[in-house]
Image: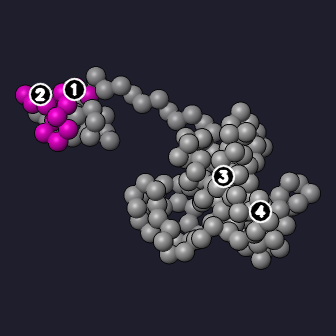
Amino acid sequence: MSQLQDDVKLCPQCGDEYTLRAEQCAECGVELVLPSQLEEAPPPEEFPATDQLACVRVGPIAWTRALSAALEQMEIRHRVEPDTRTPEEGGVDRGEFDGADVFGTWVMPNDFERAKTIDSEVFVHVLGGETDAPNAGEDEICPACGSALPVDALECPDCGLAFG
């Protein structure tokens, strides 16, 4: 958005522009403000690199999506990235997943215990010795916009929601 002068009014919720005479947004019903009255949103807090985070789980994309969705629901910030670490470095043996790409889900150290609890609830079948991934079929949908997701998507192709 270009730098606007105070020769228009804006809706603070939807951003629609109005003449100076207008008092209320036709869509939102809220009082309009001058551009100079809008509060600047603070920049998003930088999330640390994985070497400063605690890894909750490493697994195939279907597992990663399931855990990421559960962490999002509980408002636990996390990072999902491909995990190229060897088992000696803390990664997993890809042979466990038929050579599929694996992804790590990392959280802030102070969220680790909560995240592990959520992880154990999501993957209770794994704790019982089963190794089947959660179902990752055609019914995968974006939790933000409801669009169908390709099985290997790391972000929604429609709304851009990143999983992690």
Instruction: Give amino acid for label 1.
Output: Val
The dot on residue 120 is none
Q: Mark 4 highlights which residue?
A: 128
Q: Which residue is mark 3?
A: 121
Give the residue type that dot 2 points to. Answer: Glu
Residue 124 visible somewhere in the drawing? yes
Residue marked by disc 2: 23
Q: Nearer the viewer, residue 148 or 153?
A: 148
10 Å crowding of disc 2: few (<14), some (14-19), many (20+): some
Query: Which residue is at 39% across, 58% downward?
Result: 145
Q: Is residue 8 visible?
A: no
Secondary element at image label 1: loop
Q: Which residue is mark 1?
A: 33
**Marks 4 and 1, how far apart in space?**
58 Å
User: Separation of disc 4 and disc 2 at Cα?
Assistant: 61 Å
Lateral position of residue 156 relative to residue 70, left or right: left
**Badge 4 vs badge 2, beta-carbon distance below 8 Å:** no
Look at the image and give the residue range highlighted in magenta: 20-35
Q: Secondary structure at mark 3?
A: helix
